[in-house]
Image (cartoon, grey):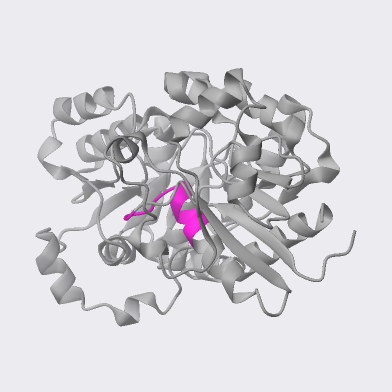
Amino acid sequence: MILLMLKVTVDVTPIDAKPSGVGLYVFNLIESLSRLETSESLKLGLAYQPRLKNWLEGNSDFPENLKHYKNLYKIPLPVRATNLFIDYLPTFIPNYIEHALEDTHIFHGTNYTVYPYQKIQNVISIYDLSCIRCPEYVDSVVQQYTKRLTKCLRWTGAVITISESSKQDIINYLNFPAEKIFVTPLASRYNPEFLNKLNPDQEIQNCNFDFSKPYLLFVSTIEPRKNIQSIIKAFNWLKQNHKIDHQLVLIGRKGWKYAPIFEAIQSSPWKHEIHHLNYLSDELVALFYSKAEVFVYPSHYEGFGLPVLEAMTLGAPVVASNTSSIPEVAGDAAILIDPDDFMQIAEALLKVISDRQLRQDLISKGKTRANLFSWENTAKKTLEAYKSIS
């Protein structure tokens, strides 16, 4: 069937006032898709479900950062309620939601769920399979995703994922046909000119952090899968055996099972030089990236590993895992290590902080590598997935 105007409605439920992770991906995707509407004969709609707390308070409004878009559709049931319907009564509410979505041709489920619509085709985003590959690193809520996701795939015409590594996992673990899986790599929230727009002195005052001492940097959610305890072990070893002057900065919200990470910080003899900073503005995070001596990311498993790309974009040399999708992102622009060997992490960090030429080479290669990724390309590859089932 050939459509003159393709109407796609994207689930923007993961977006909140301060988007990160999946929310950041969806936010940048819809921005880029909206710029392609005219040239690609695309009509973009946004669907939103309130959080349970907001729903109980009678608030089902779209987040303020989305209200400027046209074609906004509220699904006036919280995610928890519709997930229960998917689990136990999947045919109970699709007609109700389908009616709310008006003339939608394709629904893009970005929150791991879609419904068995009568007339609407489904595309679903699967970012990674940590719930299957790394069950020890996720909480009980995430562990429930697998059963629900498997059910939703029955009603799905195409899958969008963010790396070849994740595509292979989806083929291997979910038995979804390879020809129906589309890889749409992510891009950085920053561009190379972002730093030129900053007022570093003002940002430093806002942060109240001493940038005069060098530091090693990690940016992501504070949770076991990110392997932060190995960073702390490597940092302790470098402090003890090489008397490095550096601090260790960990930027990110607390996820789950984070208590042992903070216990490791407290038991470190250099705990006063280990700083956890919670959610920061994009401007401040960019500043930390740009001034880092090394960015270290020894995650056990990633669907993409966006912080690696952000670090390269903003001029931080990268030491990262040699597992899952990270080599796809980093290419030859990072030192890749075995995340299970903290001594490899420590030795790689020592190489970068001891060899100024190596550090500069990594920075140069990183910037070149980062230029290969853009949200425009992500949007165009996403459109290919939509058109494959239209």
Nearer to the camera, 55 or 200: 55
Question: Dividing the image into 4 quarters, which one contains the C terminus?
Answer: bottom right
Question: Dividing the image into 4 quarters, which one contains the N terminus?
Answer: bottom right
Q: Is residue 1 left or right of residue 359?
A: right
Coordinates of residue 240 in the picture (x, y in percent): 20, 35
Q: Is residue 373 left or right of residue 359?
A: right
| Residue 173 figure quarter | top right
Coordinates of residue 116 in the picture (x, y in percent): 71, 34
Nearer to the camera, 179 or 133: 179
Rendered residue at 25%/50% (across/down): 279
Q: Is residue 302 above or below residue 329?
A: above
| Residue 169 figure quarter | top right
Coordinates of residue 236 in the picture (x, y in percent): 24, 34
Coordinates of residue 257 in the picture (x, y in percent): 33, 23
User: Looking at the image, can residue 193 be seen?
Assistant: yes
User: Looking at the image, can residue 133 be seen?
Assistant: no
Rendered residue at 64%/36% (across/down): 94
Q: Is residue 335 above or below residue 173?
A: below
Q: Is residue 224 above or below residue 346?
A: above
Rendered residue at 32%/65% (across/down): 286
Q: How many marks?
A: 0
Nearer to the camera, 253 or 262: 253
Q: Which residues are magenta?
A: 17-27
Asked if the stretch drawn in magenta spans residue 241, the answer is no
